[in-house]
Every structure is written in C-alpha cells, then in structure tokens.
Amino acid sequence: MEFVLIALALVVAYALFEYRFRKPDEMIVRETGTGIGIRKGRLYPRHFSMVVPRTPHPLTQTIDAAAKGNLEIRVKLALTVAPSENNITALIRAGGWTGNTVAKAAEELQTLILGYLKGYTELLEMQDLSSDGIREHLLQRLREVPATLGLEIIALTIAAFDPVNPQIAEALRQREHARILDQAEALNQQARISAADARLKADEEIARMENILELRKYELKRAQFEKESELAAKRAEHELRLKHLQLDFDKAELRMLKENPELLLLTPQAARLAEASQSLKNAHTVVSLSPADGAPGAELLGLFQTMVQGALGAYRKRKEK
C-alpha cells in the first residue's frame, strides 16, 4: 500500500514537473514522425515541446545603400512579423529549435531585405527613388517569406529615406519644394478653369431657361390672341346675324305698311309726330292743317299731313277696289 502511494506521489510530482498549461498567446510545437506539428491541447510536456509566442515581433533596420552613379543613400525601415502556423517547419528550419526562433528567423529576413533593397536602388537614379517605390518593391519581393522563413509580414514602413550627402539632400528638398509649388499652382489654375466652366454652364442654363420662358410667354400670348380673335369673330358673326334679322324684320314691316298704309297712323313714328305737333305753341291750329301760325312746326306738320293724306288715299283706293 505504501508502495502504491509512493508511486502515485511520484507520478503526480512528475506530472507537475513536466506538464504545463498552454497560454492563449503561445503556439506549442512538437516533433512528429512526418515532421513538425502543433499541439492543440491545453496541457503539453515541456521537455518534448517548444513554445513559440504568437505575438508580433517588431524590428527596425537602417540600411546604407547606393543609387545609380554610386550616390549613397540611407533607408530606415520598421518591420513587424509573426510566426506562420501554416509554415511552422520553415520557421524551425530558419530559426532553430530554440525559444527565440522567431527572432533568429527575423535576422535572416533582415539579410534578405538588405539584398533586395540594394539590388533595387542600384538600378535607379537618385531622383527616381521614393519611399513608396521602395516599400512596394520590398513587399513584392517578400511574398515568398512565409514559405521560406515561416514568417508573416504584418507591417512594413519606410521610416526615412535620405541621401547621405547633405548637398544632394538639400537639392532634392528644393526640387520637391518646387514640385509641390508647381502642383499647387496647377491645382489653382485648374480650380479657376473649373469655376469659369461652371459659370459658363450656369449662364448657358440661365439663357436656355429664359429662352424657354419667353417661348412660353409667346405661346400664352398667341393662345390668348387666338381666343380673343375667335371671340371677336363670334361676336361679329352674332351682330351680323342680328342685323340680318333686323333687316328681315324691317322688310316685313315695310311690306306690311305698303300693303296697309292706314297702319302708318299706328306706327311709333306717327305717334311721335303727333306728340311733337301737340307740344307746339299753337297746337290748336293743327286741326286746320295751316302752317301760317309759325314756321318752327311747319315742316313737322307738313310731314304729318302728307303721311295722313297718303294713308287716307290708300285706304279709299282699297275700299273702291
């Protein structure tokens, strides 16, 4: 019984001494029959495994290179890498089976960057080099790093890019200053051209709208004139129709008076003549049909006398017939 307890105590002590709990930011690497693998469990034996941190590994690098014509330049860059879980074998091959395998693989990466950068700058003139161009070239060349070194490039930044010769650096700064001023002036001129073009388009649109407005006013005036002309024509036609009716009525009345002259005494004209004759100064002499009492009513009395005599004569002729 005591032997069992001692054995059990030894097993527990060995387990406490050998096994460890994996932290969330750690990757546990182990050797398998086919190569290198990653443990997925929380517990792992520390003497049969290697802990590789998953945290990003930052590093900075200053490289002295030369542009075309052997003009010296200095490039400072910042790089952040992390272990690639899909290429863990390449990481162990580059960094070794040690706890700082990522740092050793990063040193190999710095050597590659040095070669890539010098090979790129030696082919270009000083004025053709730029931070963006260097960064794009390095990112393109470092696409194979995960497969060769087992590292993933998280970030790459060109912190500084300057010629070593201060006179060349000053000349480049002046050139850049002039380029920026020229670019600003070009933008200002382009803005003026755009503003003038916008004003021209606005004036054309206003003129077009005013023309449309004038055409609509003309159309409204023409429509109003046509309506007024139509109303005037209808009014004239109506008045002409009334005049024709009045003319027909007058003809019928004259025909009736011609056939019946005695009706002349019943006409409004005869009544007005009689009334006018009664309003004369010596109206009692009208019975004698004598115009000797005054010249003012002589013509009126004569006209009335003629009308009465004509009516009586026509009546007698009709009676004799």
Image (spheres, helix red, strand yellow):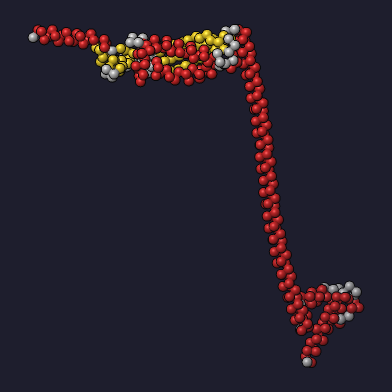
Q: Is residue 82 visible?
A: no
Residue 207 is left or right of residue 163, and the answer is: right
How many numbered tags mark residues here?
0
Residue 251 position within the rendered picture, expressed as x and y whole percent measured from the top left: 76, 77
Residue 144 is left or right of residue 179, and the answer is left
| Residue 138 shows in the view | yes
Quadrant in the rendering for residue 39: top left
Which quarter of the picture shows residue 25? top left
- Left or right, 257 with respect to 22, comes to right
Task: Give the farthest residue toward the bottom.
Answer: 320
Closer to us: 239 or 123:
123
Question: In the rendered view of the protein, which quadrant contains the C terminus?
Answer: bottom right
Picture coordinates of residue 309, whole percent (x, y): 83, 84
Residue at left offset 55%, top offset 13%? 122
Seen in the picture, residue 150 relative to 247 is either above or below; the reply is above
Q: Is residue 173 left or right of residue 65?
A: right
Residue 115 in percent (x, y) is at 48, 12
| In-front residue for pair 251/51 | 51
Q: Residue at x 59, y 15 (%)?
A: 125
Q: Position of residue 158 (x, y in %)?
A: 51, 14
Name the residue at the left extreme.
1
Q: Residue at x 64, y 13 (%)?
A: 174
Q: Quadrant of the N terminus?
A: top left
Nearer to us in this view, 218 or 3 = 3
- Residue lying at 68% horizontally and 55% vertically, measured from the top left: 223
Picture layout, residue 309 above or below residue 90? below
